[in-house]
Structures are given as structure tokens and as C-alpha cells.
Image (tube, rainbow, N blue to C red):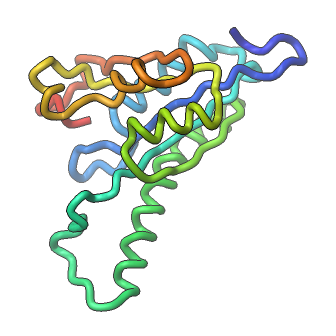
């Protein structure tokens, strides 16, 4: 699976997202789990044989009221809000890129905006990684009806092999929909 001597490294796209837990501005539990699993089970000590491609998809607020308690008095206020969203996405990716550089794994990272399942599949088609790794919250059938799952959609529709890493049960928050 890894690059042959002198060949191109195996390119693994890893879809990552922010935690939904309030006051927790970090990578989601399932994203961190998928990343750590990829390093432990696939990359192992062959750091030069792989290149990780981190994609974070920011979801635009459907009703346009992302900041209900904010007061907007000028166009600058909206630019500030967009800038803050961009910074949050970059902060998220920094966690993964920094860790890769510490252990010597080549990587790239970028942010897109839109529906995560659609954007991830579009980026897979555009980038053509060897495979895609996504985290999964491990929701039950009832929860899936209301929340839906990006990982299931990617398994069915991505143009490459997909590995969905289920979140560790011990790390499941009080509300399993949170991540």
C-alpha cells in the first residue's frame, strides 16, 4: 500500500471537522480518532511512504443567523465574522498539520465551504487520493434519520475506497450526536 522505493507516496485524504461541543474549539472526537487510527494502523513508522491530505468543510449557516447575539452595524462587522470563521478553520487544520510535521509525515490541508458530504466527494474526485478516511460517530438508526451521516454518504458515493473509523465508545459525549 505504501510507496515503493522511489515511488510516489500513498495519498490518504482525511476529512476533519470541528467539535460540536460548546466551548470546545478543537477537532471533533471522531476526526481526532480517525487521524490517530490512520497514523497508528496505516502510516506506522513508514512516514515517508504516505502523504496525508486534510480537508475541512465549513458549513454555511442555513438561516444566515450564525451569531444570533451579535449586533451588526456596518459591513466591517460581516467581514469580521467571515474572517473569524476562516481563522477557526485554519486553527483546526493547524492541529493536524503540526502533528504531521512533528513526526515527519508529508501533508497538505485546505478548507472548503458547503455541504460536507457533497464537498468531500467532489474533492475526492478532484484530488484523486488513494483512499479516504472519515470519522464516524456511530449513531443508531433513529439518530441517523434526524442527523444523517457524512461517513455513510461518502462510503456510498466517493470515487475511491473509504475507511470509516467509528468513534471510541468511551469517548462518546452525553449526547451521542455531539462530537
Say left or right for 62 vs 55.
Answer: left
- 80 lies left or right of 21: right
Q: Position of residue 54 (x, y in %)?
A: 56, 38
Residue at figure coordinates x 31%, y 21% from the top left? 167
Q: Taking 43 as reference, is 26 above or below it? A: below
Left or right: 81 as drawn, with respect to 63: right
Whether residue 63 is situated above or below residue 33 in the rendered picture = below
- Pick the residue in front: 74 or 170: 74
Name the quarter where the N terminus is drawn. Answer: top right
Q: Where is residue 115 in the image (x, y as percent from the top left)?
A: 37, 45
Res 39 → quadrant: top right
The structure residue drawn at horizontal position 31% and vertical position 42%, both measured from the top left corner, is 19
Question: Residue 15 location in percent, x, y?
Answer: 47, 34
Looking at the picture, how far across and down is residue 27, in whole percent?
39, 41
User: Quick one: quadrant of the C terminus?
Assistant: top left
Q: Which quadrant of the view contains residue 81?
A: bottom left
Give the number of callouts.
0
Q: Which residue is drawn at 41% across and 25% down?
A: 154
Q: Which residue is drawn at 63% across and 34% down?
A: 100
Q: Which residue ends up furthest to the right in the rendered image?
A: 6
Q: Specify the farthest residue to the bottom.
A: 74
**Of 103 and 133, the residue lying toward us:** 133
Q: In which quarter of the image is residue 77?
A: bottom left
Amino acid at each position: 500500500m505504501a510507496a515503493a522505493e522511489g515511488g510516489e507516496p500513498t495519498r490518504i485524504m482525511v476529512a476533519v471537522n470541528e467539535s460540536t461541543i460548546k466551548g470546545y474549539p478543537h477537532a471533533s472526537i471522531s476526526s481526532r480518532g480517525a487521524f490517530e487510527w490512520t497514523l497508528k494502523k496505516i502510516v506506522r513508522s513508514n512516514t515517508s511512504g504516505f502523504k496525508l491530505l486534510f480537508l475541512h468543510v465549513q458549513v454555511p449557516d442555513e438561516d444566515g443567523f450564525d451569531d444570533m447575539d451579535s449586533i451588526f452595524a456596518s459591513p466591517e462587522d460581516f467581514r469580521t465574522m467571515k474572517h473569524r470563521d476562516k481563522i477557526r478553520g485554519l486553527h483546526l487544520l493547524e492541529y493536524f498539520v503540526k502533528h504531521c510535521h512533528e513526526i515527519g509525515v508529508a501533508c497538505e490541508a485546505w478548507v472548503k465551504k458547503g455541504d460536507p458530504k457533497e464537498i468531500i466527494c467532489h474533492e475526492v474526485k478532484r484530488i484523486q487520493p488513494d483512499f479516504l478516511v472519515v470519522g464516524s460517530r456511530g449513531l443508531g438508526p433513529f439518530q441517523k434519520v434526524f442527523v444523517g451521516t457524512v461517513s455513510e454518504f461518502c462510503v456510498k458515493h466517493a470515487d475511491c475506497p473509504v475507511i470509516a473509523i467509528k468513534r471510541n465508545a468511551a469517548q462518546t459525549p452525553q449526547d451521542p450526536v455531539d462530537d
